[in-house]
Amino acid sequence: MTYPQTIKYLFTRLPMFSRIGVAAFKKDLTNTIRLCEFLGDPHKQFKSIHIAGTNGKGSVSHMLAGILHAAGYKTGLYTSPHLKDFRERIKCSGALNLEMINEKFIVDFTERIKPLIEEIEPSFFEITVAMAFEYFAQQKVDIAVIEVGLGGRFDSTNIITPGLSVITNIGWDHMNILGDTLEKIAFEKAGIIKEDIPVVIGETLPETKPIFEKIATEKRSPIHFSSQQRTATNWKWDKHELIVEVAELQRTDRQVYHLDLPGIYQSRNLLTVLETCSVLHEQGYAITEKTIKEALQKTKKLTGLHGRWEIIHDRPTVVLDVGHNEDGIKQIVQQIELSTYHELHIILGIVKDKEINKVLSLLPHYARYYFTQSHIPRALPADILKADAAQFDLRGEVYPDVNAALKLALGKANKDDLVIVCGSVFLVGEVNM
């Protein structure tokens, strides 16, 4: 097969969560284990960091990968989903930054395991996880940053034994799969905690902290709470940067970090990253404060991360944000409240299996809305979204796709307005930038 034919085969032949939802998720690691056994267990051939969480795990994964690359380590990075190009999911250190997996490897890998695909019928995600592990092994990475896809305990990535586990936070998302309480969701995420392997916990809640402590104790896993070690004492925006001042326990001086990821919520992710770097330093990784600061100032350039309060146009300001669940939308609303603008335009599209009413109840009623949908089966039809939104006094019109909505919004907005595209990773991925 050619590369386009291979990608079409992977997208259409295999059950894909982004397209069909829960039917593609299996509470079973058997297929991933079978695939990796067939490949010679590539996941056992490199060191790794495993990252779970409801929100922030993508940003934390990219920041850490950028730091490790800048520190001179050949670094692999596995994340999901992608925005534009399937190859965004699997990256590895190149001469200057992390580069996407090459097309030939994807074609050759798929041809190699096609007989096994036909035999065991794995999901799209199971295949991509095995592909990433094989690529990192072949590239002989020093360390790979592996982001969990969904949950933790039964996620396909959870066949690894990392050197360090990280859980960013717990919030309301995928309750139909992970459970209907924060305690149940925390238990699933905590499934990545391994015997005698340290774990860093980002944000905690009264309901979730005891879950992490109990499981870490059972697994004899040293536990580090990032919020107990550092606090963000001050922050400001300057020239599309977020500048954060951080105070550390038992230190009188304060460190200042410049992040090219300007969302205010990144200040919380920063604390998780700093604690993770501290644990890695204890494990012998040569990561200096200077390297951390330099890498954080160019995370997007080093890793290719997009869609996190990403400003793609000025006058009017146009922002893309992949926030899509209750906590993600809360963070977007907080950012809106801290922003200066004349009129607010929100281009919104949501997938069917989210807590739609909770998301809609959080959004500002004074904004002008442009209801649309991404081109996947899971997308909530824009006319239904408009009707649901009206119950929360959110008013606007329906548009066939995100780019039509954005074109109209730019036509209506004046130079001092703020235009936001949000509600779905897939919606953001369809914006023509």
Image: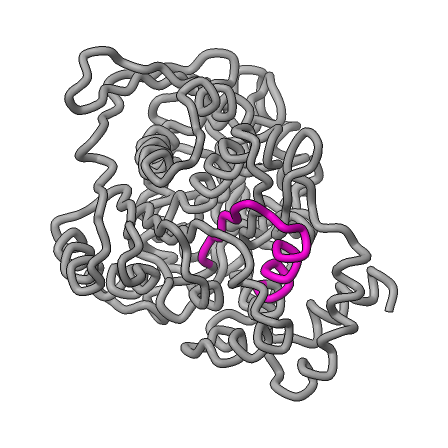
From the top left corner, tell me how far across and down residue 390 is, in percent.
40, 50
Q: Is residue 188 visible?
A: yes
- Residue 111 quadrant: bottom right
In the image, 184 versus 93, the foreground residue is 93
In the image, 330 versus 74, the foreground residue is 74
Q: Is residue 407 left or right of residue 227?
A: right
From the top left corner, tell me how far across and down residue 87 is, in percent.
69, 51
**Residue drawn 17% across the image and 34% down it:** 228
Tell me the quarter of the image containing the C terminus.
Answer: top right
Q: Residue furthest bottom?
A: 119
In the image, 243 versus 375, the foreground residue is 243
- Residue 99 quadrant: top right
Q: Which residues are magenta?
A: 129-148
From the top left corner, tell me how far across and down residue 298 is, in percent.
55, 24
Q: Is residue 107 left or right of residue 98?
A: right
**Residue drawn 23% across the image and 66% down it:** 184
In the image, 345 versus 428, the foreground residue is 428
**Residue drawn 32% across the image and 15% down it:** 255
Task: Say if the magenta span includes residue 137.
Answer: yes
From the top left corner, tell me how far across and down residue 426 is, in percent.
58, 52
**Residue drawn 74% across the image and 70% down it:** 110
User: How are the residues colored?
Assistant: one colour
Task: Say if the magenta span includes residue 158.
Answer: no
Q: How many marks?
A: 0
Tell me the quarter of the image containing the N terminus.
Answer: bottom right
In the displayed structure, would residue 142 be above or below residue 220? above
Q: Is residue 353 left or right of residue 122?
A: left
In the displayed structure, would residue 63 be above or below residue 239? below
Q: Residue furthest right?
A: 2
In the displayed structure, would residue 6 be above or below residue 200? below
